[in-house]
Amino acid sequence: MPALYTGLGVALLATLLWSIASGRFAVPFAKVIAILAAHVVERAPSWTPTEAIVVNVVRLPRVLTAAIAGASLSLCGAVLQGLFRNPLVGPQTIGISSGAALGGVTVILLAGFGTLVPIGAFAGAAAALLAVLALQRSDSVSPVLTLVLAGVVVSAFCGALVGIVTYIADPESKLPDIVYWLLGSFASATWPKLLLIAGWTVLASAVMLGMRWRINVLSLGDEDAKTLGVNPNRDRLLLLTAACVAISAQVAVSGTISWVGLVVPNLARLLVGADHRRLLPVSALIGAIFLVVADTLARNLTAAEIPVGIVTAVVGTPIFAVLLRQATRSSAA
């Protein structure tokens, strides 16, 4: 396992440097390393001021934001799949992403882009989670199944309200911004936004990684978990709250990005198995690499930047289809 962690860490570092160097204004790889090293070791500049601005101001916060968002989505996906004992569950399943999207587009409709968008996304995600938990309390026979069904209902309702917001939005001024935001993008990434997503993600990730052995117990079922001394309702609430915080922070900064939290944990499971003590950190590393690559492709494939949510959907859908096909063959064998 140390060799796998080391290999993924090296791959992530190489991907970050490649992404910073890539773009219409290409910066030589050696200069990227020199500019970044200058933050630690004082040296005479061998680069132009424009190259320093492109690296330090434009691309570095964007690339780091994409890496944190990918790690966060993948970590949340692995946690949710363990809690619900279903590899087809993703962050959209329990309605948190849809709730955050509804809160964000509502703020954009009423007040435009600004500091209120993250607050709206947090409020929408929290309201969606509370709605799911309220529906879950009405049925104590099968809490896991009820949570999934409640999430599907809340997600569908939030999606319908997002449709209403986009329908009434001014097609000249607000609608293009709302549609582009909903498709997901890191084009507006800045250092303050990076600090926002990093702070909440570190906090939520610490909770999820600290409870990873409990997810192994919860994946056995509530009765077995109680037998082993674990309180399933309390631990599930803690993990769902942590996932809510991490996902809403990602949506607030970069809009909704699908498939990452669904596909990456399944890829990681092929490498390390179903033990969440190894699955969670490996999912986070692969997710960071995956979304940085997707964002680099999104801004370099065409003259006009493609929303990264489209790239993750185009790449993630066939990967998931292959994984689903392999799982079907394995179960039939």
Image: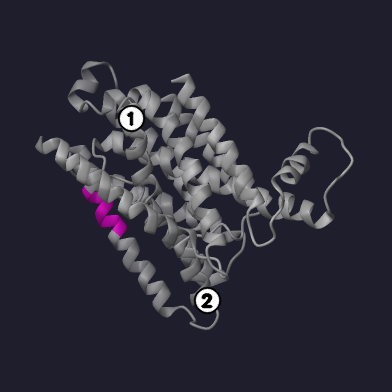
In the rendered image, residue 31, in percent from the top left (x then y), is placed at: 76, 45
Splitting the image into 4 quarters, where does residue 270 fall? top left
Q: Quadrant of the C terminus?
A: top left
| For the residues bearing labels 2 and 1, Cβ distance under 8 angstroms | no
Vertical placement of residue 135 versus 285, above or below: below
Q: Residue at x 24, y 39 (%)?
A: 86
Q: Is residue 200 left or right of residue 33?
A: left
Residue at (84% x, 55% y) in the render: 49
Q: Amino acid at mark 2?
A: Lys
The answer to whether residue 249 is visible is no
Any part of residue 228 in sight = yes
Mark 1 lies on residue? 234
Q: Nearer the viewer, mark 2 or mark 1?
A: 2
Asked which secondary structure carries label 1, the reply is helix
Residue at 53%, 36% in the rendered image: 11
Farthest-out residue, bottom: 172
Q: CA distance from mark 2 to mark 1?
A: 41 Å
Which residue bears the numbered disc 2?
Answer: 174
The magenta stretch spans residue 150: yes
Image quadrant where residue 283 sits: top left
Q: Is residue 253 magenta?
A: no
Say which amino acid is labelled 1: Arg
Asked whether, in this view, residue 26 is left or right of residue 205, the answer is: right
What crowding class fits label 1: few (fewer than 14 Cα within 10 Å), some (14-19), or many (20 or more)? few
**Image: magenta residue range:** 149-155
Reading the chain from its start, which is encountered first: label 2 or label 1? 2
Identify the element where label 2 is drawn. Answer: loop
